[in-house]
Image (spheres, rainbow, N blue to C red):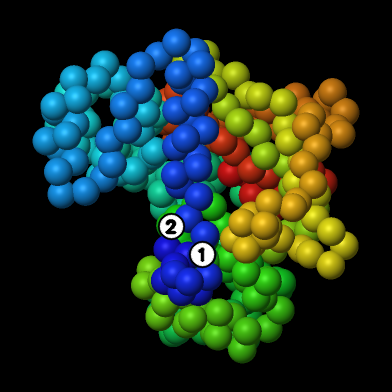
Amino acid sequence: MQEKFVGAVNVVDETDAEVEHHQRALTEAGYSIRQIRWGSNFIDDLQASQVDLVFNVSSLVEAAILEELEIPYVGSDTFTIAISSDKSLSKRLWQQAGLPTSPFCVAGSEKDCEVFRDVPPFEYPLFIKPVAGRGSAGINDASIIHSYDQLVSGVVERLETIGQPVLIEKFLRGREITLGVLGNEDARALPPLEIVYSEEHNTLTFKRKELDNSTFLCPAPLTAEETCMMQQLALQAYHVLGFKDFGGSRGGKEQQRSAG
């Protein structure tokens, strides 16, 4: 997705390094590992591998194939992957469950922005990003919107380059906290991690993630009460979407930017 937004030459693909990291950890834990790469022979290679368990990377297509072939895999099923891949659908489900998440709407065309021209449904500044995707793809410094003209320009740019609807949220200032979650019915939230921006930055863009020079505080400097509250919110967000095995939730303290 990010390649569509800024061009392939401007994106460094770290997939192989990530796969190597997981492979090394599993090998050190005593497991026999085989990499199966996506391609035209994926199904044949998968069936020939005779593996006991697949570590899926949360791809909907891969999960669907694994389910059809009845091959066990870690992570959530196709239903949850489909739901969580759509940020607007996830937020609607969180709203219905009474979880805090920033006000939002979805723009599939320039005309959909017009509601923000005269009497916007919620106040500026706004925050825009593709309705699907992960890893901050489609997010840059211009994602923070202060005027109607900026909104139209940003939405049109993402519609034309990425080719999917744009999520428009109210931008909320505050600290950014992320929590990992492990487990199923008895899931537990890991200690909160805070992403600390430098003074001139207001959000974590795809480019800054690539630079990997942000400051991370784990556990985040929170009171015991604040930590418990955020862990409970993370667990609720996790269960509402039906995640399995592992997941993550991102939010903020004081002025929450998002429940997940």
Name the spot of residue 44 as percent of width and height, x first.
11, 36
In the displayed structure image, the side of residue 190 where residue 113 appears, left or right: left
Q: Which residue is at a point 40% across and 80% down the rendered structure image?
A: 160
Name the spot of residue 105 as percent of width and height, x first.
51, 65
Query: Between marks 1 and 2, how big is the CA–CA gap?
Result: 18 Å
Amino acid residing under circle 2: Ala
Of 21 and 225, nearer the camera is: 21
Q: Secondary structure beneath disc 2?
A: loop
Considering only order in the chain, which callout, 2 or 1, is on the residue closer to the N terminus?
Answer: 1
Kindly indicate whether the residue at mark 2 contacts the one at mark 1 (C-beta within 8 angstroms).
no
Q: Which residue is at a point 34% across and 43% down the rendered structure image?
A: 59
Of 131 and 96, nearer the camera is: 131
- Asked if 149 appears above or below 256 in the picture, the reply is below
Q: Is residue 106 in view from this perspective?
A: no
Instruction: Please tell me the numbered disc located at residue 132.
Output: 2
Q: Quadrant of residue 69?
A: top left
Amino acid residing under circle 1: Val
Q: Quadrant of residue 148?
A: bottom right
Tag count in the figure?
Answer: 2
- Residue under pointer 1: 11
In the displayed structure image, the side of residue 67 where residue 158 appears, left or right: right
Q: Nearer the viewer, mark 1 or mark 2?
A: 1
Q: Quadrant of residue 98?
A: top right
Q: Which residue is at a point 64% across and 49% down the rendered structure image?
A: 258
Q: Which residue is at a point 48% across and 30% down the rendered structure image?
A: 22
In the displayed structure image, the side of residue 247 where residue 82 appears, left or right: left
